[in-house]
Amino acid sequence: MNIHEYQAKEVLASFGAPVAKGVAITSADEADSAIASLPGPVWVVKSQIHAGGRGKGRFKELGDDAKGGVRVSFSPEEARANVDEMLGNTLVTKQTGPAGKQVNRLYIEDGADIARELYCSVLVNRETGKVSFVASTEGGMDIETVAEETPDKIHTIDVEPSQGVTAETVQALVQAFELEGQAASQAEDLFPALYRAFTETDMSLLEINPLVVLKDGALRVLDAKVSFDDNASFRQEGLQKYRDLTEEDEKEIEASKHDLAYVALDGDIGCMVNGAGLAMATMDIIKLYGAEPANFLDVGGGASKEKVTAAFKIITADPAVKGILVNIFGGIMRCDVIAEGVVAAVKEVGLKVPLVVRLEGTKVDEGKAILNESGLDVVAADDLDDAAQKIVKAVKG
């Protein structure tokens, strides 16, 4: 689950991280009181969307010469004008794609007198199996560019899970960030707080870019991006209040209701597969034969007829889908259950695009019989290679 910047800062502040005062608004009617509640003389108006690159983004409605999605304002009047120009318009960034995202929320924040910008993130290091800090003195930039051009400026510091953030960990981070004076002293509290926030709320990513050193020597979290591990949501019910459904794909929301692993993509061949690895292989072979998958969809190992029906309906609800490939290898999942779900879904919503089905494994003969006797216009495939070629040929005509 992704959350907005202002929500991330609320979570971090609850663990003691230093953040600026700010107010989130969803209506222009709230702007004047929000601006008046901040001391100034600088107000920063920030678009709140689940995508990076906001500052360099452009609003569709305002043309290429318009200012970006994060704007520094030097008077209440300028801040209000920025609110009126940004709220409700569509912001396009390098992460939104050309369609962009409508800005339904703004965060108006007190300005900062910045001396240095740093990059700090906390994540799970898959190579070591530990939570790690990633630190760089090159904050405010694309960390990928820094990693490519000046990798020596990126430092990874692992945290021993049995010890947490120790004095040695803090010292390593202080050296990596080249902190001194008040900032170095403040780090003794900040970095343990960030680690506690990450572990205690089951974050999968915490990115602060930039973490700034102010001209008075203090540290401040200037921007924050947080994602939570959905697998831990059962023990983090208090965090569900931060979920913004307007930022999520409607099909992905529906899939989550049925415990389906679904991610919408940009292609035109819908995929229904059991198992994440097989789903990735299915998408790869579709691309190999010159087409693009419209989604990643893993129905799981123990899906019911109802779950399969829901999955099929989600795929067919996507207007971009020009063909569907069902690829099931029955281990725990039985092929006859998949077949029953597909037949039920087609009878309910109809079938307007080519459908190729490859079944193999447990109850495969029973599954094929169900499809053959259904009267549906289903193209059978012998194996994955055969299935991919047939669906790509059907879609491309």
Image (cartoon, rainbow, N blue to C red):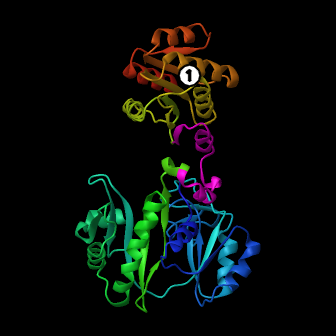
Image point (50%, 85%), residue name: 112
Most foreground residue, 219 or 325? 219
Q: Check if residue 242 falls in the magenta segment.
A: yes
How many labels, in total? 1
Q: Locate residue 103: give its quadrant.
A: bottom right
Most foreground residue, 341 or 158? 158
Q: Check if residue 237 falls in the magenta segment.
A: yes
Image point (44%, 63%), residue name: 198
Relative vertical location of residue 232 with respect to residue 390 in this rendering, above or below: below
Most foreground residue, 72 or 296? 296
Q: Can residue 351 be seen by looking at this rendering?
A: no
Q: Is residue 177 left or right of 247 when viewed as pictured?
A: left
**Where is residue 86 shown, x and y percent of the image?**
65, 69
Q: Is residue 346 left or right of 233 when viewed as pictured?
A: right
Mark 1: give few (<14), some (14-19) or many (20+) Cα within 10 Å: many
Relative vertical location of residue 153 with respect to residue 262 in this rendering, above or below: below
**Where is residue 181 shown, x and y percent of the image?**
33, 90
Residue type pointed to by label 1: Pro
Q: For the magenta stretch, what is the residue range?
A: 235-264
Task: Examine the residues drawn in magenta and state their main secondary structure.
Answer: helix
Q: Read off the residue under disc 1.
A: 354
**Where is residue 141 shown, x and y percent of the image?**
39, 70
